[in-house]
């Protein structure tokens, strides 16, 4: 885990007010030695104490949050896990961010660019070695070239070749040349469709950064969703009927139900040009409701989504902008199904009981978890949650970062995280109180979800969804029942990943750590 980088800021603002360490410590009711550790960045700080410091120094809390810096340190730490740069000392990422943030961002950008090119090269190499078309094409090229060369050598070496034979060899050369040209054109067209360098990973990362920098919360889109709900007369828990009528009335959208007939079942499809929303007859009610909300968001809130994207300097690639558009339209759909003014107080009153909220708003487990991670409206904040979704191979398919907790970007996280343990108990909620090597504690909640069934004979598509929050806020949730939340209470010892974790005695370790912090 990255150490905090807010100590210098606290010290600078304290000195600007003319306070000594002893004076500020007395005001905060903590010891001067503890404040000294905080200002020296040798103690992580968050929660109530950080808020009290901000109030005492008359600064906004965001001034000391350090979320962007921590994320940069986390990413540099993951870069240090690469074998090519594994000799970097552990403290250098935090020092680099603290002293030269511009160079740190440049290093991250260069690493991303290099990794993207490696992905593209690997994809092209695999394609060149495995695709049967390429093998046939190369064979045809060699065959035609050999025939052309043989006929040309005969014409060159035999000066008095009789006209009939000369004509036959010229015809062979012409025919093989045409076939060679056809094969070359087909090969060029095929290779033009190969993966382009730079597009393998960067769009996902740029959208992750975009969402993180907005705190997982978009006030303009919340307002747009509220306005659309009012226009359509949509009420929490009964959104689909109102939006279905609005889509038909305002945009002439026809809703069609498609039968599976024993074949593959596709997800809901909205053809905007044709004005048709197609819903499989086997879709769950929560899936149908979200499909209505997503179609309505696309038709009514495109301008607000475009404005949010245009206002960002992080989305540099066209693919990033397209992905961001899908993400933000889904955000609006979630706000339609679970409007902030109704959902946030309901979540607090229910102590963030995911299943209870799902029944009240007609939403799925995943939809509720995702919405809980977006409740950051000033003055009406919910618990700050991180969100993570993985497939059985450990691939991260969706993530909303939590400041202070680095969710994996370049590979799998610690196998002891609840998001992986949920696969061992499909359908059951897995609850874990975990502790990282530096002492940070989090509550992790995870459950598997099954996407729409594809019918008999097709393996079910299972994903695992996880919510995580700082253990300081766990007592505000129903999931704290029966847990001992004291700092001295037992907790599952976890890390970020094997390469980043100093716990050498862990029985789950698969790789050596890049550091040796003396922990045994």
Image (cartoon, rainbow, N blue to C red):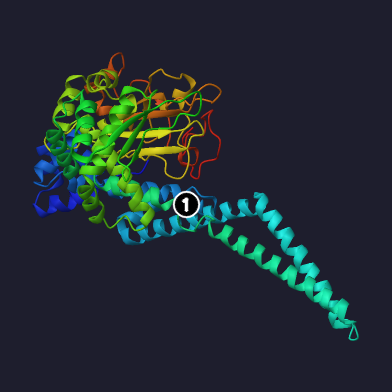
Against 355, residue 176 (above or below) is: below
Total numbered badges shown on the rendered structure: 1
- Looking at this view, is 321 or 503 the one in front? 321
Against 407, residue 101 (above or below) is: below
* Image quadrant occupied by the N terminus: top left
- Looking at this view, is 59 or 331 the one in front? 331
Residue appearing at x 15%, y 27% in the figure = 342
Can the viewer see residue 509 in this picture?
yes
Residue 114 place in picture, x, y as percent: 48, 58
- Looking at this view, is 185 or 474 the one in front? 185
Q: Hey, which quadrant is residue 375 in on the image?
A: top left
Residue appearing at x 28%, y 58% in the figure = 313
- Looking at this view, is 132 or 62 the one in front? 132
Can the viewer see residue 45 in this picture?
no
Residue 158 place in picture, x, y as percent: 90, 82
Residue that sits furthest to the bottom in the current view:
159
Residue appearing at x 38%, y 46% in the figure = 74
Residue 182 place in picture, x, y as percent: 65, 64
In the image, 371: left or right of 437? left
Residue 8 place in picture, x, y as percent: 23, 51
Q: Secondary structure at mark 1?
A: loop
Query: Which residue does the numbered mark 1 point to in the structure image?
Result: 200
Q: Residues within 10 Å of mark 1 (few under 14, many from 20)?
A: some
Residue that sits furthest to the top in the current view:
482
Residue that sits furthest to the front in the current view:
164
Residue appearing at x 44%, y 23% in the figure = 422
């Amino acid at each position: 885990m990255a150490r905090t980088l807010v100590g210098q800021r606290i010290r600078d603002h304290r000195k600007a007010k003319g306070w000594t360490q002893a004076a500020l410590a007395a005001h905060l009711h903590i010891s001067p030695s503890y404040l000294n550790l905080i200002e020296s960045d040798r103690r992580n700080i968050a929660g109530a104490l950080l808020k009290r410091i901000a109030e005492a120094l008359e600064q906004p809390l965001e001034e000391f949050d350090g979320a962007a810096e921590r994320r940069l340190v986390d990413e540099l730490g993951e870069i240090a896990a690469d074998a090519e740069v594994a000799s970097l000392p552990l403290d250098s990422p935090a020092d680099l961010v603290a002293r030269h943030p511009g160079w740190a961002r440049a290093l991250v950008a260069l690493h991303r660019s290099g990794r993207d090119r490696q992905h593209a090269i690997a994809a092209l190499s695999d394609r060149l070695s495995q695709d049967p078309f390429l093998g046939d094409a190369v064979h045809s090229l060699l065959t035609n070239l050999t025939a052309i060369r043989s006929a040309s050598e005969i014409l060159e070496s035999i000066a008095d070749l009789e006209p009939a034979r000369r004509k036959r060899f010229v015809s062979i050369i012409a025919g093989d040349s045409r076939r060679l040209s056809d094969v070359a054109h087909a090969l060029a067209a095929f290779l033009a469709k190969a993966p382009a360098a730079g597009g393998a990973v960067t769009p996902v990362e740029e959208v992750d950064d975009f969402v993180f920098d907005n705190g997982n919360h978009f006030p303009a889109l919340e307002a747009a969703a509220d306005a659309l709900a009012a226009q359509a007369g949509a009420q929490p828990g009964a959104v689909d009927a109102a939006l279905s009528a609005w889509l038909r009335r305002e945009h002439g959208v026809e809703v069609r139900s498609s039968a599976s007939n024993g074949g593959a079942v596709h997800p809901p499809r909205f053809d905007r040009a044709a004005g048709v929303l197609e819903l499989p007859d086997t879709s769950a009610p929560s899936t149908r409701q979200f499909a209505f909300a997503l179609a309505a968001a696309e038709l009514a809130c495109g301008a607000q989504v475009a404005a949010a994207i245009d206002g960002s300097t992080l989305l540099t690639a066209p693919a990033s902008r397209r992905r961001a558009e899908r993400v933000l339209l889904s955000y609006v759909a979630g706000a339609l199904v679970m409007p902030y003014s109704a959902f946030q107080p309901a979540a607090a009153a229910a102590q963030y009981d995911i299943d209870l909220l799902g029944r009240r708003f007609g939403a799925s487990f995943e939809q509720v978890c995702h919405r809980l991670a977006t409740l950051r409206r000033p003055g009406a904040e919910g618990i700050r949650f991180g969100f993570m979704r993985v497939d059985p191979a450990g691939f991260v398919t969706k993530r909303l970062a939590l400041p202070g907790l680095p969710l994996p970007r370049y590979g799998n996280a610690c196998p002891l995280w609840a998001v992986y343990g949920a696969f061992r108990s499909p359908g059951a909620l897995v609850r874990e109180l975990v502790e990282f090597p530096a002492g940070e504690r989090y509550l992790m909640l995870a459950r598997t979800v099954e996407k729409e069934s594809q019918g008999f004979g097709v393996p079910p598509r299972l994903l695992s969804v996880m919510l995580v929050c700082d253990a300081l806020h766990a007592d505000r949730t129903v999931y704290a029942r029966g847990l001992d939340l004291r700092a001295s209470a037992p907790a599952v010892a976890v890390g970020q990943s094997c390469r980043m974790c100093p716990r050498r005695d862990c029985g789950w370790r698969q790789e050596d750590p890049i550091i040796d912090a003396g922990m045994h």
